Image (cartoon, grey):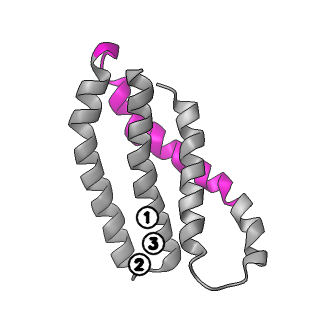
């Protein structure tokens, strides 16, 4: 299980998704460019916390030989349902504000993809 590589991938994916959704609004893009680079710091911290505290413990708790079968196939569907529900609830509570919806959408997609990345590195 390669957590550092997964953290780098997750940070990149999350930043791209977040800013792609934000840039759908009409505003001055030139003034926003510095914030794109500065946002990588909190995005990487959030990704590291979520992966290390909510995804990796599932893999750490199982024996090496049975990780892929038992962890990904058993726990990922429930994790995805819970995360989707929380992100949808957050977006609804925020009245679908662009910035918060971008955060929740990128969080859901990134955590789902992180499960897949960790399972693939574990299976190979």
Q: Nearer the viewer, mark 2 or mark 3?
A: 3
How far apart are the two marked residues, 2 and 1, measured between alpha carbons? 10 Å
For label 3, the crowd category at 10 Å Cα-Cα, with few meaning under 14, some 14 to 19 and many 20 or more, is: many
How far apart are the two marked residues, 3 and 1, measured between alpha carbons? 5 Å
Q: Which mark is residue 104?
A: 1
Give percent across and percent down for residue 62.
Answer: 30, 21
Whether residue 19 sits left or right of residue 73 in the image: it is: right
Read off the residue under disc 3.
101
Count of numbered badges drawn on the protein: 3
Give percent across and percent down for residue 45.
Answer: 59, 48
Residue lying at the far front in this picture: please name it.
Answer: 124
- Residues 85 and 121: in front is 121
- Residue at screen point 53% across, 74% down: 99
- Determine contact: label 3, label 1, CB under 8 Å: yes
Is 44 colored magenta in this rendering?
yes
Give percent across and percent down for residue 123.
Answer: 37, 22
- Determine contact: label 2, label 1, CB under 8 Å: yes
Can I make out residue 45 in this image?
no
For label 1, the crowd category at 10 Å Cα-Cα, with few meaning under 14, some 14 to 19 and many 20 or more, is: many
Q: Which of the 4 image quadrants contains residue 107?
A: bottom left
Q: Which of the 4 image quadrants contains residue 23?
A: bottom right
Q: What element does badge 1 sit on?
A: helix
Can I make out residue 84 in this image?
yes
How far apart are the two marked residues, 2 and 3, measured between alpha carbons? 8 Å
Whether residue 81 sits left or right of residue 42 in the image: it is: left
Q: What element does badge 3 sit on?
A: helix
Is 100 colored magenta in this rendering?
no
**Magenta extent:** 38-65
- 51 lies above or below 26: above
- Residues 94 and 105: in front is 105
Q: Which mark is residue 94?
A: 2
Residue lying at the far bottom in this picture: please name it.
Answer: 26
């Amino acid at each position: 299980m390669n957590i550092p590589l997964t953290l780098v991938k997750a940070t990149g994916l999350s930043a791209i998704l977040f800013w792609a959704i934000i840039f759908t609004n009409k505003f001055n893009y030139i003034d926003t460019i510095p914030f794109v680079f500065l946002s990588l710091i909190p995005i990487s911290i959030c990704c590291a916390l979520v992966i290390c505290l909510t995804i990796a413990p599932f893999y750490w708790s199982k024996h090496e030989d049975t990780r892929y079968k038992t962890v990904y196939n058993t726990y990922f569907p429930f994790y995805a349902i819970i995360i989707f529900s929380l992100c949808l609830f957050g977006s609804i509570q925020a009245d679908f504000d662009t910035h918060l919806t971008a955060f929740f959408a990128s969080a859901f997609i990134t955590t789902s993809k992180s499960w897949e990345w960790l399972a693939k590195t574990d299976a190979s």
